[in-house]
Image (cartoon, rainbow, N blue to C red):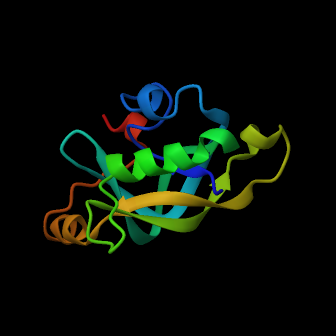
């Protein structure tokens, strides 16, 4: 049961958090995904693998009793298909939990998490017409 790395509408305070994750979280901690870039979508972001880039988000640990239902609901929300052809693909990737989320003065640590990345068609579209969010942070997309 891997935690989820949320970088867009599933982050606390964003439009999909309450519906899909509200009341189901054990922990929410600031984290970053290195080696990926954040791009604008039609009302939501896409992360794509990109060396030297960084995406800011939250590492969300879901309560074990809620995990199967949350995983299925998020796969449905993200149009994550078993054959990898959906709008997003779900991959296990290392994310870095920010030190202030662990305890002051502590070193950052990496954990594996589920990350929804842009699927093949969306990745191709973004390569053809990039729409980067320079900060790598959907909350500071301004």
State whether residue 97 is above or below residue 9.
below
The residue under the point 32% across, 75% down is 83
Rendering quarter of residue 15: top left
State whether residue 134 is above or below residue 37.
above
Q: Quadrant of the N terminus?
A: bottom right
The residue under the point 20% across, 61% down is 130
The residue under the point 59% across, 25% down is 23
Rendering quarter of residue 95: bottom right
Q: Quadrant of the C terminus?
A: top left
Rendering quarter of residue 34: bottom right
In this rendering, position of residue 45 left or right of residue 135: left
User: Visible in this render: residue 51?
Assistant: yes
In this rendering, position of residue 119 left or right of residue 97: left
Asked whether 26 or 66 is in front, the reply is: 66
Q: How many marks?
A: 0
The residue under the point 83% across, 39% down is 103
Asked whether 24 or 16 is in front, the reply is: 24
Which percent across, then down, holds residue 53? 45, 63
User: Visible in this render: residue 136?
Assistant: no
Which percent across, then down, holds residue 56? 50, 48
In this rendering, position of residue 36 left or right of residue 77: right
Which percent across, then down, holds residue 94? 62, 65
Which percent across, then down, holds residue 54? 48, 58
Asked whether 23 or 66 is in front, the reply is: 66
């Amino acid at each position: 049961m891997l935690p989820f790395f949320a970088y867009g509408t599933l982050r606390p305070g964003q439009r999909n958090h309450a519906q899909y994750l509200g009341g189901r979280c054990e922990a929410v901690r600031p984290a970053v995904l290195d080696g990926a870039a954040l791009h604008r979508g039609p009302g939501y972001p896409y992360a794509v693998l990109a060396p030297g880039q960084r995406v800011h988000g939250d590492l969300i640990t879901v309560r074990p009793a809620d995990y199967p239902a949350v995983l299925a609901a998020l796969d449905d929300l993200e149009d994550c298909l078993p054959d990898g052809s959906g709008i997003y693909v779900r991959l296990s990737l290392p994310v870095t939990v920010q030190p202030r989320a662990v305890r002051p003065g502590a070193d950052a640590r990496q954990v594996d998490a589920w990350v929804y990345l842009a699927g093949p068609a969306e990745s191709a579209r973004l390569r053809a017409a990039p729409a980067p969010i320079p900060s790598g942070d959907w909350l500071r997309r301004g």
